[in-house]
Amino acid sequence: MRLTAAVLDAPHARELAHFYLRLLPGWRVWQGEDRRDWVHIRPPDGGTGLSFQTEPAYVPPVWPSGPGRQQMMIHLDIEVDDLERETARAVAAGARLAAYQPQDDVRVLLDPAGHPFCLYTDSQ
């Protein structure tokens, strides 16, 4: 067995896949180039990728979560060399900075479909 991808639901799979292609340098479409409902992207080394599935009933998660609110099922952690520069680049690519930031050395952002993801630096 081998894990090949995490799948994120979205109202428009292709749009969300293209956001992550802008965000993750060198990644490319692996499968689903000609489909509107499902796309799989992978890093240049061919490792574990991300897939995106159109879900018409998709409801964005709420960050931070709270009782009775749609909670996230998964979030992505993305290591970067320069937190401020990469946060600005993510926003320019279409992400939104989350209002709630629980840590000084991590930035929580929301992708265009509302999925939270974190940018962080390895300060060790």
Image (tube, rainbow, N blue to C red):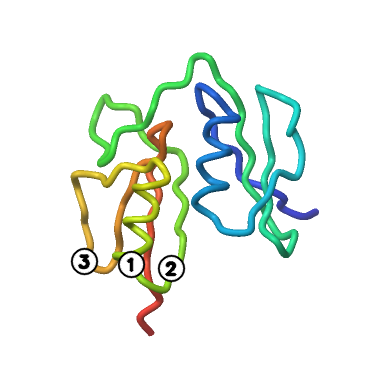
Q: Which mark is residue 63?
A: none
Name the residue at the bottom extreme: 124
Image quadrant in which the C terminus is located? bottom left
Give the CA separation, mark 1 to mark 2.
Answer: 6 Å
Quick one: label 2, few (<14), some, or many (20+) residues within 10 Å?
A: some
Q: Secondary structure at mark 2?
A: loop
Give the CA separation, mark 1 to mark 3.
Answer: 10 Å
Quick one: label 1, few (<14), some, or many (20+) residues within 10 Å?
A: some
Residue 34 x, y percent position in the rendering: 75, 27
Asked whether, in this view, residue 78 is left or right of residue 89, the answer is: right
**What residue is rendered at 66% in x and 58% in y?**
43
* Residue 49 sits above or below residue 82 on the image: above
Q: Which mark is residue 104?
A: 3
Could you tell which of marks 1 and 3 lies nearer the N-terminus?
Answer: 1
Residue type at mark 1 is: Leu
**What residue is rendered at 38% in x and 55% in y?**
89
Residue type at mark 2 is: Val
Residue 105 x, y percent position in the rendering: 27, 68
Asked whether, in this view, residue 95 is left or right of residue 33, the answer is: left
Name the residue at the right extreme: 1
Asked whether, in this view, residue 88 is left or right of residue 58, the answer is: left
Residue 70 x, y percent position in the rendering: 34, 27
**What residue is rendered at 51% in x and 27% in y?**
10
Residue 26 x, y percent position in the rendering: 63, 59
- Labels 2 and 3 touching (C-beta < 8 A): no
Residue under pointer 2: 80
Residue under pointer 1: 83
**What residue is rendered at 57% in x and 47% in y?**
21
